[in-house]
Image: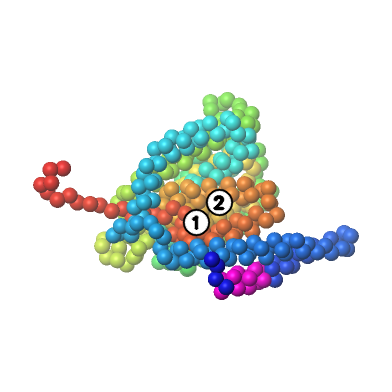
Amino acid sequence: MFKLNEIKKSFLTSIWFMFLTFPIMVIKVNTITDTVEWRWKNLAYVGIGAFILSFVWRWALDRRAKGGKAKKDKTGFNDTILSRTSQLKLPAIIGLGLLVVFLPFFSGMYTTSIVTTALMYVILGLGLNVVVGLGGLLHLGYAAFYAVGAYTYALLHYHFGISFWVALPLGALFSAVLGLLIGFPVLRLRGDYLAIVTLAFGEITRLVLENWNDFSFGPSGIANIARPGIAGVKMKLPQATIFIYFIAIAMVILTIFIVNRLENSRVGRAWEAMREDEIASQSMGIDITKTKLLAFSIGAVWAGFVGVLFAAKTTFINPASFTVWESITVLCVVVIGGMGSIPGVIVGALVFTLLPELLRSVSEYRMLVFGIALVIMMIFRPGGLIQKTRKSYKFKEEGDGK
């Protein structure tokens, strides 16, 4: 049974919530008819909801403090979760594969377009994960690389009629070069200072695109960018949407493969060592300059790819598509999904892009619900939705016959 003290705490919490949300939830001013509507019913809903949720909140905090009932091994990893995950791995991959292949054929064009956008954020998240999650370099100007890829395709197509397939590697190349250029001046920076410089870099790039009219056509942007095609085959909008969806799928698979290989390579281990302790890794013989520049340039490559795909998907770009909020969104994908974790970043990107769309039916409150969900997740799972698990190796004794 509930104790009197807990009921008192929940009651005070509900009173506070009713007081704080009173102007938003109760008062509705109609400026046309000069009337004020008092929605007292909403105040009752807030009070009852806050009263119930406060019990759930305390229960969850208490459960977290006790550390859960799951069994943990000596290294602190959760055996139960890992064993369940391995058992469900194959059926989940098969089911996911079938869903991915047939999704555009039984869903509408709108759903296909939204999922394509989510897949683009998966690639962006995995690219930024190289810089932030593996390299430990806080980067807030990632949208600049994204913009370089998009403008590379848009300008090359506008002036020279370059096709999507030719522009795709060129966009990645130019983004990688820009990654190297931003990497050199910030070699000695870390933490908040690096974040401020990269944030400024992203804003400078956007302002240049917005004000250099002769080069980028300013705020008017560039329209009529060609969608991708095959051997000159002209596609209608539904067919082109499905085609771009499968291009995004192929790029996601390629990105996962390469990032996974990089993570397990010598370079990936150097990134992780640099993230953990830059001075210690340098003393062990890791070239920090080379490692940082590699992280910036390889992370930028994926943003360049997605930028070209974005320009081809929307057929119109302008600087408003590459604001600082775009960089923050991609960073949130990495942090919420799980820094350094490839499955975590994928799940984070899908949640971050699909959840706002699913909440469109309650569009008036969807950002509020989304914000509450983020706060709850950051309190109870600060390491991300799927945390990166540290690899462990076991050595067998000689002579055991195995």
- Depth order, front residue of 121/372: 372
121 part of magenta stretch: no
Q: Please indicate whether residue 355 sits to the left or right of residue 275 in the image.
A: right
Percent of width and height locating residue 339: 43, 56
Task: Give the residue at mark 1.
Answer: 336
Which quarter of the figure has residue 15? Answer: bottom right
Q: Residue furthest front?
A: 1
Quarter of the figure that contains the N terminus:
bottom right
| Residue under the point 56% across and 74% down | 5
Name the chief secondary structure element in magenta: helix
Which amino acid, by three-letter code, is at mark 2? Phe
**In this picture, which residue range is highlighted in magenta?**
5-17
| Residue under the point 17% across and 49% down | 396
7 part of magenta stretch: yes
Task: Give the residue at mark 2.
Answer: 352
Percent of width and height locating residue 28: 79, 62
Which amino acid, by three-letter code, is at mark 1? Ile
Label 1 element class: helix
Q: Is residue 163 above or below residue 292?
A: above
Q: Please indicate whether residue 83 sits to the left or right of residue 309 in the image.
A: left
Q: Is residue 332 above or below residue 10?
A: above
**Residues at circles 2 and 1 in contact by the CB criterion of under 8 Å:** yes
